[in-house]
Amino acid sequence: MKRIIFYTNQFFGQIGGEDKAYIPPRIEDGAVGTANLFKDKVEGEIVATIICGDNYYAENIEECREFISREVERLRPDLVIAGPAFNAGRFGIACGDVCSFVNDKYGIDTITGMYIENPAVEIYKSNTYIVETGNSAASMRKAVPRMAALANKILRKEEIGLPEEEGYIPKGIRVNVFHEKTGAERALDMLVKKLKGEEYRTEIPIPVYDKVEAAKPIKDLRKAKIALLTSGGLVPYGNPDHLPAATAKFYKKYPIKDIDRFAEGSYESVHAGYDPVYANENPNRILPLDLFKELEKKGEIGSLYEFYFVTTGNSTSVADATRMGMEIAEELKEAGVDGAIMTST
């Protein structure tokens, strides 16, 4: 009987929600939580389930890897299954890292499942099989059989087909395929089908990006109300609202009406994508409130909006970023804000 280790987070491991996101890794015998959905579908025994809080894994990756190493060496699995993480960024990062780490260090096959826009996909798709899922746990019933089917092929050591055949996200590996027709002939065939309005499938998919129409210039900055935004993770010291260090799904706003600058020790950056030492020495390096207050006093801008908005932009999914942007924009429009400055990090 083939041996399988399953990895999941605090929520799908039936421990708790965000209040348990900082629990350190633990291991339970057999199938626990989501692993039970795979138990009767995979051609192997789920010998143990590793459960870890999403925030804990993101902030203690090396410690979590050490824990996983000990359990992999003790249990000697033939396969590791993680997730599925759907569009949950922090969970996706953990699943991707577990699979990539185990595969790289031990040469053990791994598989996970994610929504195509999960930020972990681009990071880990070349190091593990990532079965494409829907964007939420509502697609669990479809995700589990697809992941299990691929897992069984891996366990049987069968040749794994192309991504569109097996349902996994392309790993960026080019494979030579022999065709009866040359590339030029196939291209002309596709062109004819396109002109006739018939269905065809390109061999080189081109990414599609949203086009955003630029706003019209502000006619007179001296009469304009300006809002300040940042994706640099700048929050009041101690991070009272627990803004995630990465893969944020929400933003916060904090008052700036009665302060002239962000003071060292009163504000800090919780962003996990850069070294925050210099930012914490002078938080205005992330969001230059001091400079904009001077502009306001000199009358070079009409006024500053009384709140600033903040999130952490690293590893945030396109879907979450779009939603947050629309929510912030709606509030700014209602408040009569004419323009916004969003500093990059």
Image (tube, helix red, strand yellow):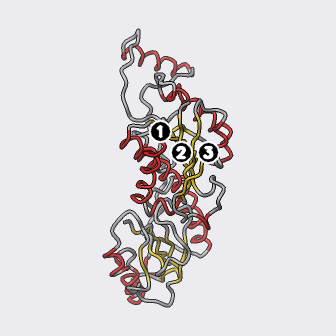
Residue 81 percent coordinates (x, y): 53, 41
Q: Hey, which residue is sitting farthest left in the picture?
A: 278
Q: Residue at x 53, y 26 (%)?
A: 153
Number of numbered tags placed on the structure image: 3
Q: Position of residue 226 (x, y in %)?
A: 48, 76
Whole-number angstrom distance, CA of label 2 to CA of label 1: 8 Å
Q: Give the answer, above or below, for where 340 lies relative to 161.
A: below
Q: Earlier in the sequence, mark 2 or mark 3?
A: 3
Q: Residues within 10 Å of mark 3 (few under 14, many from 20)?
A: some
Residue at the front extreme of this rendering: 74
| Type of amino acid at the residue the image marks with label 2 | Ala
Q: Secondary structure at mark 1?
A: strand
- Image quarter in which the C terminus is found: bottom left
**Looking at this view, is 310 or 112 the one in front?**
112
Q: Residue at x 59, y 70 (%)?
A: 333
Q: Amino acid at mark 1?
A: Thr
Q: Which residue is mark 2?
A: 82
Q: Marks 2 and 1: CB-CB under 8 Å?
A: yes
Q: Nearer the viewer, residue 179 or 52?
A: 52
> Dot 1: few (<14), some (14–19), or many (≥20) neighbours within 10 Å?
many
Q: Which residue is mark 1?
A: 110
Q: Which residue is mark 3?
A: 30
Where residue 157 appears, x then y in whole percent? 47, 24
Kindly identify the residue that appears in the image at 68 percent across and 46 percent down.
138
Above or below for 291 versus 3: below
